[in-house]
Image: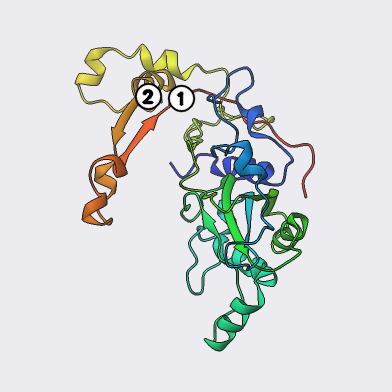
Amino acid sequence: MYARPWQRVDDFYLNIVRANLSLPLLFGAQTLVVDHNDTGIAALSDTCELESVATEDRSGRRARTTFKIILSYHGGSFDGWQKQPGLNTVQSIVEGSLGKFVDEKKTQLLKDNGLPIEGCAVVAGRTDKGVTGLQQVCSFYTWKKDVKPRDIEDAINHATPGKFRVISVSEVSRVFHPNFSAKWRRYLYIFPLTNGRYTDQSNDNGHFYNSCKYNEIHDSASKDELENGKKSYMFSTSKVNRLLRKLEGKLLSYKMFARDTKASRNDGPPTECFVYHARAMEVKPPTTVSAM
């Protein structure tokens, strides 16, 4: 397993983050896009989106400004999203960069409590160590005046260039929430078919497999071979795809993954997700012509 060309997978993700490559290139004529926008975030109504974030509330105080931040980061360069003491996490980078945009009242409160001057970023899904985030959505709000989206974008991008990239920052209504405004999320797994025991399963172009037709070989295995307990070294993408497609259009329970949640949230709707799209396919990850 470890002999497989995982570095090529990691390099592919890194090049997407750096904008040297784009994810659609991976699939060519095939596509994983469902009938929603690319970020997976629900589009708020025109009235909601155009609502002025600089209006005053009923008490006469200036309303807070909320920003939607879409970003990509290289998982191998961070210890996950969640901020943890002594670890290099995405959240710590983002919130540290947002510190300069915190309003005076909150800044003073943080100083009085001996805490670092940082912003608070709410994210749609936290990634584990080594997991790359592509077009992940988070939000940040402040009462500080004259904060511009470009200022936020520049501040975050300058923190870890080459490993982290803000795609866009925009002002949105204060009712926007990365989690509760989301319609769907996309998860992509790349598994190199090349096994280290074979020397001819990769080529100079960086493709993960050669003309050897894995599916045909694996699918043609006799029932006797499988019944005799012989281990197959060939991976059948077509079989996996047939299994995954049976999940499409179904509302599935993920209760088994909710063991650490409150009792009131470990059953029923809070643990159910609708599967829009589930596919497996063989692809040839493109290589970049330039690197940073």
Q: Residue at x 24, y 49 (%)?
A: 266
Q: Nearer the viewer, residue 158 or 285?
A: 158
Q: Secondary structure at mark 1?
A: loop
- Report the amino acid beneath label 2: Leu
Decide: few, some or many residues near mark 1? Use Cα within 10 Å; few <14, some 14-19, many ≥20: some
* Residue 256, x across and y down, in percent: 24, 44
Q: Nearer the viewer, residue 229 or 110?
A: 110
When asked about the image quadrant of residue 45, the answer is top right
> Quick check: marks 2 and 1 in contact, CB under 8 Å?
yes
Reading the chain from its start, which is encountered first: label 2 or label 1? 2
* Residue 67, x across and y down, in percent: 64, 54
Residue 187 visible to an observer of this rendering: no
Q: Tell me the colour scheme of the image.
A: rainbow
Q: Residue at x 62, y 31 (%)?
A: 285
- Report the amino acid beneath label 1: Ala
The dot on residue 280 is 1
Q: Which residue is mark 2?
A: 244
Residue 119 visible to an observer of this rendering: yes
